[in-house]
Amino acid sequence: MVIRIRRSRHEEGEKLVSIWCRSVDATHHFLSADYRVELEELVSSFLPEAPLWVAVNERDQPIGFMLLSGQHMDALFVDSDARGYGVGRLLVEHALSMATELTTNVNEQNDQAVGFYKKMGFKVTGRSKVDEQGKPYPLLNLAYVGE
């Protein structure tokens, strides 16, 4: 699979929300059903307008995305059908090409993501008992230290 990284386009908003949904459904089994719906509504309200970096396949169709704010990766999601092809790795490498330091937060219960980031060279630097919305889903604060 040939993968490129480019900026998102406004008309891709619905597809990017769909990628978020499929990714979360595959990895965030710990979320309550009500909170999952609440998060989807929140994501749907801002994601289409967000300045995202998008991983696209050879047909220029989005298969993953990343939201990078300075040196902090606010979001990284890969379509469940595209997992295992290096999409997440390419997005992180793209972020590292633009930032001298890189941090992110990840749900502590998301074992797959925690393992991915540790494999990519991130180290736990802190922990929050709640997520960004104040819900009881602990977050790990991670910083890139090198592979």
Image (spheres, rainbow, N blue to C red):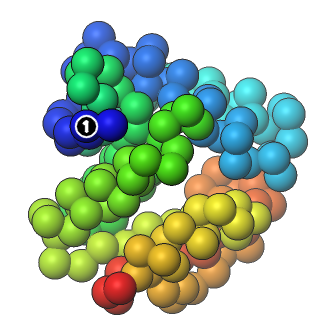
Query: Which quadrant of the rendered structure holds the N terminus?
Result: top left
Quadrant of res 22: top right
Which residue appears at 49% of the width and 71% of the height? Answer: 117
Q: Name the residue located 44 percent from the left edge and 80 percent from the top edge.
A: 122
Mark 1, Cα crowd under 10 Å, few <14 / some 14-19 / many 20+, is few
Q: Residue 99, relative to residue 47: is it above or below?
A: below
Q: How many labels does the image show?
A: 1
Q: Please say whether residue 77 is visible from this viewpoint.
A: no
> Taking 121 as reference, is 92 above or below it?
above
Image position, residue 88 (x, y; %)? 41, 53
Image quadrant where residue 92 sits: bottom left
Question: Residue 60 at what x, y percent from top left?
Answer: 24, 22
Q: Is residue 1 above or below residue 140?
A: above
Please provide percent x and percent y for residue 41. Answer: 62, 24
Q: In this view, does 27 lie to the left or right of 69?
A: right
Residue in the picture at 73% in, 48% down: 28
Residue reaching furthest to the front: 1
Residue type, mark 1 in image = Val
Callout 1: SS: loop
Q: Residue at x 70, y 41 (%)?
A: 26
Position of residue 147 in the picture relative to residue 33 (left or right): left
In the depicted structure, whether residue 121 falls above or below residue 39: below
User: Where residue 127 appears, x then y in whole percent?
Assistant: 63, 80
Q: In which quarter of the image is the C terminus?
A: bottom left
- Give 132 or 81, whichever is nearer the viewer: 81
Q: Can residue 73 be seen in this snapshot?
A: yes
Which residue, given by chain and number where applicable, does mark 1 sit on? Answer: 2
